[in-house]
Image (spheres, rainbow, N blue to C red):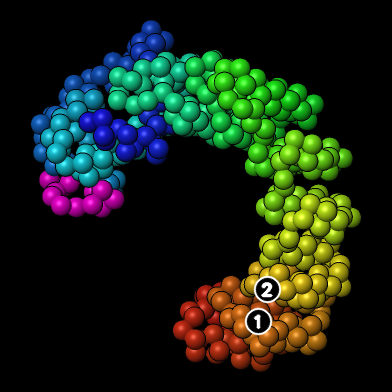
């Protein structure tokens, strides 16, 4: 059984902690909700356990893959009415102790059912959510009894699950409790920072937390773990930079690169792409352009297709089409990368229709796409072109593209056919 638990820990540990923890919380409901608890256990006792096991065994069959079994169990309406119980799962796992695929499928099915039970309990206000995270820690402490190891990976899964459920403060408290005997890593702090960003923490408090996390990081690695001090990595700084920009603390966001350089953390292309995209969305066109023109060359980081796409999209969004085409020309001259379907499809083609440059710009763009860069048109591109041309009263051109599309065995959408017919 230990091998089964190890196989599923990556996918199911977070659900498992909350599900097991809910059993403790549920037991406290007896005094406040006696009717619900009594009905629950009456239903539990009324189930024909043997019949349920036989039904499930028949459905599982023999020789099927784990995914096939799982989908069969989830999709079967007759199985969905079977009441989940500890005895039922134990008997199934024991029956398939020599068939790991079937046992693993049963375990995953049990996790899905536990998720449904928790959601039903939550909707009926039967769960005291503020106590579950404390029980989850106790469950984590008992992992050795389940054949699992309490290590950095399992701690990260627990923290990530809580952060995704927006129990960020509780996740931080759990981390502070566990850090004394479980070493954190870069992913640990990325989880916590990302959790704070998702709940849109106010900027002043966010800055304090980030500084505390980084300070704790240094202390933990140097004193507790007796390892060399490990500075935050580029992913951490990317998360911090995006959060500062979203909080409209643009000056501090622009200083992130300097802070990275100070600790010897080199920004990469993905960092700058996120930086440009975030600044562009905030309307800071000059700052985004400075990052592209100055900061990236200074850091010896080469742009890629996504970098150019972000710049082109930004200029098109703010109706600066000439600057968008200048970036496209710069991309062509650089020789670093080539335009892709997104370079043209999303911003430039739409810009042609928006600027009413159908007979000039659109011809040139399509010519470059097909003849110069050999970029084939896909369903989305054909749809965009046909719809735009119909609205621009270029129905003949639109119909020619429609026929070309059908000839290439690309199935048009109903809306496209309806628009052409109209």
- The mark found on residue 341 in the picture is none
Which image quadrant is residue 220 in? top right
- Identify the residue at image location x=86%, y=56%: 294
Query: Which residue occupies the extreme top position in the image?
Result: 31
Q: Which quadrant: the N terminus?
A: top left
77 left or right, relative to 225: left
Q: Is residue 213 magenta?
A: no
302 left or right, relative to 384: right
- The mark found on residue 373 in the picture is 1
Residue 338 to residue 206: above or below = below
Which image quadrant is residue 78 in? top left
204 left or right, relative to 382: right
- Identify the residue at image location x=32%, y=16%: 37
SS at badge 2: loop
Instruction: Provide residue 261's location: percent of width, then percent of height.
Output: 78, 41
Q: Is residue 378 visible?
A: yes
Q: Nearer the viewer, residue 233 or 226?
A: 226
179 left or right, relative to 314: left
Query: Which residue occupies the extreme right position in the image?
Result: 286
- Identify the residue at image location x=64%, y=72%: 340
Report if the CB atoms under discs 2 and 1 are less than 8 Å apart.
Answer: yes
Q: Earlier in the sequence, mark 2 or mark 1?
A: 2
Q: Which residues are magenta?
A: 58-69
SS at badge 1: loop
Measured Cα–Cα span from mark 2 to mark 1: 8 Å
- The mark found on residue 338 in the picture is 2
Instruction: Provide residue 303's location: percent of width, then percent of height.
Output: 73, 61
């Amino acid at each position: 059984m230990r091998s089964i638990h190890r196989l599923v820990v990556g996918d199911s540990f977070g659900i498992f902690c909350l599900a097991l923890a809910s059993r403790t919380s549920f037991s406290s409901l007896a005094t406040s909700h006696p009717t619900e608890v009594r009905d629950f256990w009456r239903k539990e006792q009324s189930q024909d356990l043997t019949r349920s096991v036989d039904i499930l065994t028949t459905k599982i069959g023999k020789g099927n893959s784990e995914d096939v079994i799982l989908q069969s169990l989830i999709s079967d309406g007759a199985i969905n009415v079977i009441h989940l119980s500890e005895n039922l799962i134990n008997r199934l796992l024991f029956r398939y102790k020599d068939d790991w695929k079937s046992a693993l499928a049963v375990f995953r099915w049990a996790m899905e059912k536990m998720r449904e039970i928790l959601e039903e309990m939550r909707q009926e206000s039967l769960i005291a959510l503020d106590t579950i995270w404390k029980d989850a820690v106790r469950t984590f402490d008992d992992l050795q009894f389940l054949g699992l190891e309490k290590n950095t990976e399992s701690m990260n899964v627990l923290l990530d699950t809580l952060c995704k459920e927006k129990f960020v403060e509780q996740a931080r408290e759990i981390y502070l409790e566990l850090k004394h005997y479980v070493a954190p890593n870069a992913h640990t702090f990325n989880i916590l920072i990302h959790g704070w960003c998702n709940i849109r923490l106010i900027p002043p408090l966010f800055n304090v937390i980030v500084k505390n996390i980084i300070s704790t990081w240094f202390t933990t690695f140097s004193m507790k773990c007796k390892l060399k001090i490990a500075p935050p990595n580029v992913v951490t700084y990317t998360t911090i930079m995006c959060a500062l920009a979203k909080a409209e603390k643009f000056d501090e966001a622009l200083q992130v690169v300097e802070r990275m350089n100070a600790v010897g953390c080199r920004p990469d292309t993905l960092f700058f792409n996120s930086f440009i995209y975030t600044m562009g969305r905030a309307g800071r066109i000059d700052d985004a352009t400075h990052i592209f023109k100055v900061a990236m060359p200074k850091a010896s980081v080469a742009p890629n297709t996504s970098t150019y796409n972000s710049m082109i999209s930004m200029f098109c969004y703010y109706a600066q089409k000439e600057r968008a085409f200048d970036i496209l020309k710069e991309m062509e001259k650089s020789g670093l990368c080539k335009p892709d379907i997104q370079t043209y499809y999303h911003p430039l083609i739409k810009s042609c229709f928006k600027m009413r440059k159908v007979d000039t710009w659109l011809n040139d763009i399509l010519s470059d796409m097909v003849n110069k860069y050999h970029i084939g048109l896909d369903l989305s591109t054909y749809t965009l072109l046909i719809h735009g041309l119909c609205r621009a009263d270029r129905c003949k051109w639109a119909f020619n593209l429609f026929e070309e599309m059908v000839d290439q065995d690309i199935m048009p959408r109903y809306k496209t056919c309806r628009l052409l017919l109209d």
